[in-house]
Amino acid sequence: MPPVFRFAPSPNGYLHLGHAYSALLNFDLARETGGRFLLRIEDIDPARCRPDYEAAIYEDLAWLGMSWEEPVRRQSEHLDDCRAAIDRLMAQGLVYPSFESRAEVARLVAQRETAGTWPRDPDGAPLYPGAAKLMSADERTRRIEQGARYALRLDMAAACAAAGELSWIERGEGPGSETGTVVADPQAWGDVILARKEVPTSYHLSVVIDDALQGVTEVVRGQDLFHATAVHRLLQHLLGLPVPIYRHHRLIRDDLGGKLSKSTGSTGLRELRAAGARPADIRLLVDLP
Ligand code: GLU
C-alpha cells in the first residue's frame, strides 16, 4: 500500500511561507515514496472560515506547482462522523457537558491562581478548572433541555485510565528534539473540549477522524502540533482508529524569530507573488531543494 500524505489548512486566512513549507514537504514526500497526496480543508469554525480563503488556498497551491486528489475533503461536510464518534465516547462514559461561558472559566482560573499556580497546557492555556464533571445527570439534562449552551469535554483522567500508556512513532522531531518512540502525555491538556452545542466537533476530534477516514498513513505537520499528538493518540485508541506515523517539522519564523501569522504581509504567498516571486523562490526561502 502506498503511503498517504495530506496537507490540512484552515481557510481562515491566506497562506504564508510556513504553509508553503508544510504543503511542499508533504507533496515532495508523496512523490519520492510513490505515495498519495491529499488536501483537506479544516473548516469547522464557521465564525472564522471563508469561501474566498478556501479559493485562495487552491490558487496558491496550484501556483506552487502542486496537484492533489479530488474530491477535496471538507471537514464541515462530515459532521455526522463526528457526532457518531462523540456518541461512542459518551457510551464509554468518557464525555461530559460543561456549561460555563469562556468568561466564567477565566474567572474560575483567576480564583485558582490566587491560591497558587494553576496548570497550563502545552500551548499555554489554563486547564479547565470547573466542576461540571461532578454535576448530577438530572441537572445536566435539565440545563440542556432549558437550551443552555455547553461544551462536551473529555474526562481525561477516566480516558487515560481506560487507555493505559500510549505512544507514537515520530519520524521528525518535537520542540525538545523528541524522536523515535514518543510516550504520549495527554494529561497535560486536561479535560479538552471535543465538541460544542453549536459545532459537534473540535480540531482534535475532526483531525483524528478525518486522518483515519482518508487512510492517512503519515501526518507531516508543524512542530507547534507536536504536543497535541498526545490527545490525538488517545482519541485514536478510544475510537479504535488506526495510528499514522508522525513527522513534525521545523517552523518557518519571521525575521524576528516569531511565529508566522495569517496576517503577516511580508511572508504571505500572495504578497510574495505580487512582488514578483516565482515558485522556485518560495522553495529557496523555506530551504527546500
Ligand atoms: N488545520 C490545522 C492548521 O491549519 C492543521 C492540522 C494538522 O495538520 O493536523 O494548523
Image: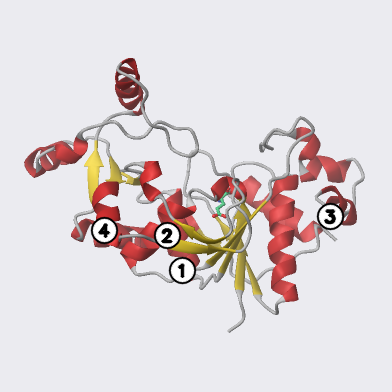
Q: Residue at x 59, y 57 (%)?
A: 8
Displayed quadrant of residue 142: top left
Specify the amino acid type for callout 3.
Answer: Arg
Q: Nearer the viewer, mark 3 or mark 1?
A: 1
Q: Disc 2 to disc 1, how far (Cα)?
A: 7 Å
Q: Residue at x 40, y 31 (%)?
A: 126
Q: Nearer the viewer, mark 2 or mark 3?
A: 2
Q: Disc 4 to disc 2, how far (Cα)?
A: 14 Å
Q: Circle 3 is placed at which residue position?
A: 283
Label 4: how many Cα within 10 Å (few below 14, some 14–19, many 20+): some
| Left-right relation of 22 to 9 | right
Percent of width and height locating residue 58: 69, 57
Specify the amino acid type for callout 2.
Answer: Arg
In the depicted structure, whether residue 138 falls above or below residue 82: above
Q: Circle 1 is placed at which residue position?
A: 243
Percent of width and height locating residue 61: 74, 57
Which of the two labelled residues, at mark 2 and mark 1, occupies the earlier sequence position? Answer: 2
Q: Disc 3 to disc 1, how far (Cα)?
A: 30 Å
In the depicted structure, whether residue 172 falls above or below residue 129: below
Q: Are marks 2 and 1 in contact (CB under 8 Å)?
A: yes
Specify the amino acid type for callout 4.
Answer: Leu
Q: Circle 2 is placed at which residue position?
A: 233
Residue 47 visible in rendering: yes
Looking at the picture, tell me which residue is in the foreground, 271 or 203: 203
Which of the two labelled residues, at mark 3 and mark 1, occupies the earlier sequence position? Answer: 1
Looking at the picture, tell me which residue is in the foreground, 50 or 69: 69
Percent of width and height locating residue 176: 59, 46
Q: Tag 3's secondary structure?
A: helix
Q: Circle 4 is placed at which residue position?
A: 89
